[in-house]
Image (tube, rainbow, N blue to C red):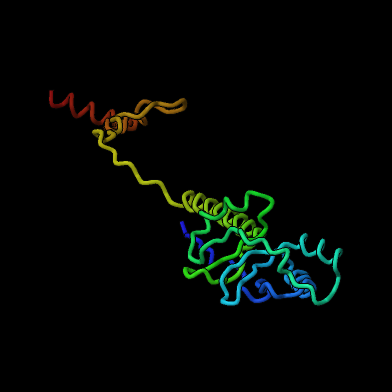
Amino acid sequence: MQQHFVRDLMRIRHGLVVTATATLREVAERLIISDSDLMAVTDECGKLAGVVCESSIVRALLVNPATHVTIQSIVVPHAESVRLNANLATVQPLFRSCANTAIPVVDENGFVCGLLMRSDVIRSLLNRNTESAETATSTASTARLIPATPVAFTGSVTAFTPPMKRTIHAGESVYEAESNQPRPHFLRADEARRVLWTAEDRL
């Protein structure tokens, strides 16, 4: 079975990662464009500093719609993350909770590479199940096309010997049925008398 890794499914960091100095309006615009409800937040070095949710941005904009307000006050510093080279099957349980719609992806040094979206994971599972079903159907069809292996017959075989005489059917004479018997020779009347006279003369 083919293995899938986080790096194969994650979305790259462009547009999905912001710094803590980004403004509320800037982050809100990025969320709308990216069709996501979560952004990864990095520090000045590019390492993961937390996440910011769409709901938090909406509440902050309602309270203070000023253009210069940053997201520093609404960043959640303790956020789950997954490694870039992690097997996708090992991180799928993280999406069982409705709270996790996206998870930041980091490399071995802690630098943010992008986001792993729950919708992408679900789509991957659906595609994989479809491929498995098609493979199973194809295998079954191929199996039906393969001829069965002939079984060797180990029993003794007795050759069939036709009977010397065939069955007499209605309308057939005994002489016609018994092909091995010679047919009798019949003489005409004058020839029969001549044979008898010859025999009497010899007597």
Q: Is residue 128 above or below residue 10?
A: above
**In the rendered image, is residue 158 in sight?**
no
Q: Is residue 62 above or below residue 129?
A: below
Left or right of residue 131, residue 29 in this image:
right
Q: Quadrant of residue 21?
A: bottom right
Counting labels gives 0
The structure residue drawn at horizontal position 63% and vertical position 64%, both measured from the top left corner, is 50
**In the rendered image, is residue 79 in sight?**
yes
Q: Quadrant of residue 57?
A: bottom right
- Measured as percent of width and height from the top left, residue 41 is found at 65, 69
| Closer to the camera in the image, 4 or 148 | 4
The structure residue drawn at horizontal position 56% and vertical position 71%, both measured from the top left corner, is 47
| Closer to the camera in the image, 29 or 129 | 29
Q: Is residue 28 above or below residue 3?
A: below
| Closer to the camera in the image, 59 or 99 | 59
Q: Residue furthest front?
A: 73
The structure residue drawn at horizontal position 51% and vertical position 61%, both measured from the top left corner, is 4
- Measured as percent of width and height from the top left, residue 165 is found at 31, 29
- Measured as percent of width and height from the top left, residue 143 is found at 46, 50
- Measured as percent of width and height from the top left, residue 188 is found at 34, 32
The structure residue drawn at horizontal position 13% and vertical position 26%, both measured from the top left corner, is 202
| Closer to the camera in the image, 153 or 190 | 153
Left or right of residue 181, residue 81 in this image:
right
Q: Image quadrant for the C terminus?
A: top left
